[in-house]
Amino acid sequence: MTADSKTAEYCRWCYEGGAYTYETTMDEMIEDCAPRMAEYMGWSVDESASLLGAVLPTLKRWREPAA
């Protein structure tokens, strides 16, 4: 994969040019994204944070490495 190619493993806001666009923790990501997701989806911030808390740990960026 070239530095300019897209990837199905990461969203365009998190990964670009072969690297993460910014460093963050999963908790910071939830705190940052939940309010915007809630507004966009018409959900409460708690509902959005709950979904993000369930989904983000399954993504490659935060998934626990295999032992």
Image (cartoon, rainbow, N blue to C red):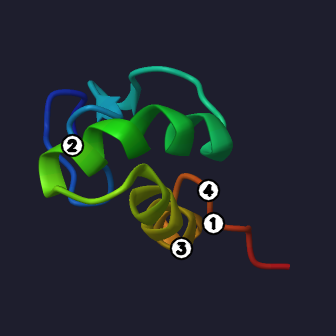
Q: Nearer the viewer, mark 3 or mark 1?
A: 3
**Circle 2/circle 3 CB separation < 8 Å:** no
State the mark number for residue 40. none
Q: Nearer the viewer, residue 32 or 20?
A: 32
**Circle 1/circle 2 CB separation < 8 Å:** no
State how far apart marks 4 and 2 are (Cα).
Answer: 25 Å
Tell me if residue 22 comes above or below residue 60 in the rendering: above
Q: Nearer the viewer, mark 1 or mark 2?
A: 2
Residue tagged 2: 39
Q: Amino acid at mark 3?
A: Ala
Q: Residue at x 48, y 20 (%)?
A: 22
**Circle 4/circle 1 CB separation < 8 Å:** yes
Q: Nearer the viewer, mark 3 or mark 4?
A: 3
Residue tagged 1: 63
Q: Is residue 31 left or right of residue 67?
A: left
State how far apart marks 1 and 2 are (Cα).
Answer: 27 Å
State how far apart marks 3 and 4 are (Cα).
Answer: 12 Å
What element does badge 4 sit on? loop
Residue tagged 3: 54
Q: Amino acid at mark 2?
A: Glu
State how far apart marks 3 and 1 are (Cα).
Answer: 12 Å
Crowd band around label 1 with a 10 angstrom C-alpha radius: few (<14), some (14–19), many (20+): few
Q: Is residue 2 left or right of residue 23?
A: left
- Mark 2 and mark 3 lie on one chain; the one further toward the N terminus is 2
Tell me if residue 17 comes above or below residue 9 in the rendering: above
Q: Nearer the viewer, residue 27 or 61?
A: 27
Give residue 36's quadrant in the image: top left
Q: Residue at x 28, y 49 (%)?
A: 38
State the mark number for residue 62. 4
- Mark 3 and mark 4 lie on one chain; the one further toward the N terminus is 3
Q: Amino acid at mark 4?
A: Trp
Q: Position of residue 23 (x, y in %)?
A: 58, 24
